[in-house]
Structures are given as C-alpha cells and as structure tokens.
Image (cartoon, grey):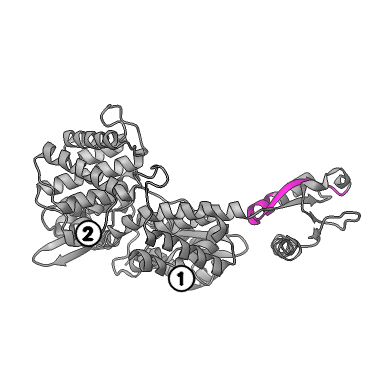
Amino acid sequence: MRHSEENLQKILETLLKNDSDGFVTLDDLSQVLNISKRSVQNYLNKADSWLLEHDLPDVRIIKKQGYGIRLSVDFSERQKLASLIKSRYFTMLEGSVERRIEILRSLVFSKEELTIQFLADQFYVSRFVILSDLDWVENWLSQYKLKLFKTQRRGIGIAGDEISRRAAIAGFFDLKELKNKSVVYESKQISRLSKENLQKLEEVYDKKDIINICAIIEDAEKEFDFFMGSDFFTALVTHMTISVFRLRHGCEVKKEFLPPNEEFPQLEMNTALFIAKRLESMFSIKLPESECIYICIHLMSYNTFLDQPDGEYRMPENIEMLAMHLTEAIDAELGSNFAGDKMLFFGLVYHLRSAIYRLKENLGSHEHSFPILPDNYEDIYSSICKNTNLYQQFGQVAPDQKELISIAFHFGLSMERITQKKRALIVSNSGILTQMEMYHDIQQNLPEIKVVDICSSQQLSFCEESRYDFIIATASLENTSKPVANIAHMDKEESRRFIEEFVFTKLCDNT
C-alpha cells in the first residue's frame, strides 16, 4: 500500500473510532499521522471523495469551527465503512466509480463466472486494484443479501436466491441513474419513463419488450382504476422487464422465498393476475403462482390502492401494532407526546404497510438518495435506531437506512406540528449587523424559538407585547412584563445554552 493510502486509511480509522465520542481536532490527526495540519486538511478533502467513490454518500465528515472534525455515520453504514477501511486491498485510486460499476455490471449480467485476470485485462489495471473493487462490489451486493464466491476453478460469481438477484439488477439501474439527470422521453407509449431509464434498460433488454410491458401496466391501471406516480411506474416496469427476461431463461421465483400462508389483499391480487395473464399472452411464457404473488407484493409495496374510500381497505393488525408500539417507545425515551398526533399515526401505518413488504422481499428502493436529517431530528433518529427490534417483533424484518430516515421524518414533521415555538424579541443596542448576526445564530441553532423582531431598548416601547413571549436582551431592561433572558457578556455558545435553559425552566413550566 502506498504511503498516501496509509495516511488516508489512518484518518478514516481514527474518525470512525471516535464517531461516538465527539470531535477530534486537526492537532489530534496531525499527531496520529505525524504530518502537518495543512496535509491533514488535504487528506480530509480526499476522504470526502473516497466516501463518494465507495458509494457512501450518507457518511459525512463534519468540520465545525471551535470543535474539530467528526464522522456522521449510522450503524449499518458504519459496518460497511469499517469493512472497506480494514480491507487489505484498500486503495484511493481515482476513477474507480465508473470501473466498479462496470465490474458490477459484468458480474450481474454475466451467465458465466469471471476471473480476476479477465477483469484486470478488461480495465487495464492490476489484480490488486480489481481485488479492491471486488470488496466494494461485495459490500454493494450485501444490501440485497447476495454474496460473491471466488474459487480457483469456477472464478468469480454471485450467490443468492432469485428474488435477491432481481432486486440487485433493479438496484444496478438505480445506481447508474445517479450519474445522470432525468430527461422526459418523447415517445407516447413510454412517456412515463425517463430517457436515461429507457437507455439503461435497452442496454440489456429489447426496447419493444419494454414498450409492451409499459402498455400492460397502463391497461391494468385503466381496468382497476388506479394510477401510479412516475417513480413507482418506472420501478414496476423495471422489475417486470427483469422478470420476463429471467423467466425466458428459466429463472423463476421459488415459492419458498415468499411469505408463507399470507392472505393478500384482493385488489392487488386481482391486478397481479390480470398483469400475469397479459404477460403470458404477450411473451409466450408461463407464470407460476409464485410469480403472481411476487407481482402482488410489488403492488402492495407501492401502496397502489392507497386512495380507496374509507372502510373499503383494512389495515393489517400487525402494522397498526408496530406503529403504536414504535410511537410509545419514542415517547417514553424522549418524553414527548407523539401518541396524541393522529396525523402521525395514520402516516406511519400507511408508510409501514408498504415498507414491511419492501423490506421482507428485498425489493430495493426507487429512491436514489436520501435527504440529510436536520440537526433537531437527530435525537428522534437515534431513538428509532434503538427500537428497531419492534420491526422484527411485528413485521419479521430488519429496517434499512432508508426506512430509519423515513420514519425519522414522519416523527420530525409531527414534532413540528405539536411543538409550539416560543416567540422571541431580540433587544440589543448594537448595530444592525451585530443584531442580524444574533438573529441568524438563534434561528439556525435554536429551532424551538422563532425570532419575531429585533429592536433597541429605545424602540422597545413601540413593540406590541402580544407579538412575543419573551425577550432576549444584551442589556438590563426595566418596565417590561415579559420574561427577559439577559445574555450580556456571553459568547455564542454560552448564550445558546442559557437561552435553551431559560426557555425550558422559565417558559415551558408556565404553559
């Protein structure tokens, strides 16, 4: 391993080791590596690129002035990152993204095993680089419960069941789409697919087949009176295109990989049977019962019939129990009152109904990136991560990162609904620039407070007291009936802590 790679590896190892303890400083990292602080900063920039190159966009290196550097990473991504860092094939070779995607493509679509030497010759790199790439490939495949096998006689291939293989193929198309922006395709029959989606599917499958599958799904929409959004439509077309191709080559979903003795909703099952019959007629193939169930599960995972009138669609009891117990657990840990938010409950049950089937059958995700959680959602996210056992108890599944983030947003929106922000008036005799700096600092770092106005002590008498709940002041004030948080002679960090404590002890106790 090159010296530069050793330094990058040490930085990532140090940040990962300390991710639960807080920040490390540039001095700390400089001493660990025995290099200058400027060199450490250069390696941190390389580390950002390395994380993206290794398909870890949700692992972030956070640099905060006055504190230092820390790694933001959840449990599932932590294991993946640790595995890549500790790999004896660790490398920082640039340009690896495109090569790794092409190696993944070769393995996913190849009918035969491939050798390391063959891949090295194909991409004009050393065997060592290919071994590093295969570490990345294996980590990527693991999210679909697939593994690589490497044997001297057979070469390299993918091991796993049919459902997981199909999910990985669909995931590969999503992975490729990260490199392109969506452009609407002008053809009438496939206007609901992006140009990039169509082009990627056409690299492997016949365009005419894709058009026919789009038409079958659109006919099902008309027959059963529903309409799928473009993301869901694209995901279903992709999965059905993959299914048809695999069935033509004798690869079908086995019944033992599907939920045993499951009672499936009638609307979804009837729609699945309709689609199955049309596929059989169009492509001269035979779909066994297991394939019909698989289509039904897809329709369930997309909440296809979510808009049915009240009373016509019954929510499974285990889903309602999961939503209730999850809410109670978050309430108990955070001391909140989410249980009283009916909007949260119904949002959770409809989300969980589709999520459980997506997780149970490893259908993959039609969403290609996850938004960053706001800082004030971190406690919620942490609490959800501690209660993932409820998913196993009521759904017999383990949630992935997408699911944990989605649930955190449900609770975060509820928090915004049920938390009434305290209205603050800033009173300061400093100039407008200093006043605005205070305003932005409070709004950014104290989300439970809404600053309604800024004024000087001379202007205070002209501000209606009904507009604010309390005053944040930098000087002593007289003749005011509202509580005053005096932050004179405090730095930013001290003033934030003081205001937080003031709101909690002086205001919340009186509500």
Which image quarter holds the C terminus?
bottom right
For residue 176, above or below residue 257: above
Q: Give coordinates of residue 486: x percent, y percent.
A: 81, 60
Residue 447 inside the magenta-drawn segment:
yes
Label 2 sits on a secondary structure element that is loop
Provide the residue designation for mark 1. 14
Question: Would you call the spot at circle 1 few (<14 residues within 10 Å), some (14-19), or many (20 or more)?
Answer: some
Residue drawn 84% across the image and 50% down it: 429
Q: Quadrant of the N terminus?
A: bottom left
Residue 337: say if magenta: no
Q: Nearer the viewer, residue 289 or 44?
A: 289
Q: Which residues are magenta?
A: 440-457
Q: Work out how far the residue at label 1 is from the one at label 2, CA to CA, in angstroms.
A: 43 Å
Relative side of 380 to 211, left or right: right
Examine the rendering and report whether any part of residue 247 can be seen: yes
Q: Position of residue 433 (x, y in %)?
A: 75, 46
Outermost residue toward the front in this view: 311
Which amino acid, by three-letter code, is at mark 2? Answer: Leu
Earlier in the chain: of badge 1 and badge 2, it is 1
Q: Is residue 121 left or right of residue 231?
A: left
| Circles 1, 2 touching at the beta carbon (< 8 Å) | no
Q: Is residue 317 left or right of residue 108?
A: right
Return the residue nearer the eye: 295 or 19: 295
Q: How many marks?
A: 2
The location of residue 190, given as percent across then percent down, is 27, 32
Q: Amino acid at mark 1?
A: Thr
Q: On the image, which quarter does residue 340 sit in?
A: bottom right
Image: 177 above or below 510: above
Q: Which mark is residue 327?
A: none
Question: Hey, which quadrant is residue 395 in on the image?
Answer: bottom left
| Residue 63, visible in the rendered structure | no
Residue, disc 2: 258
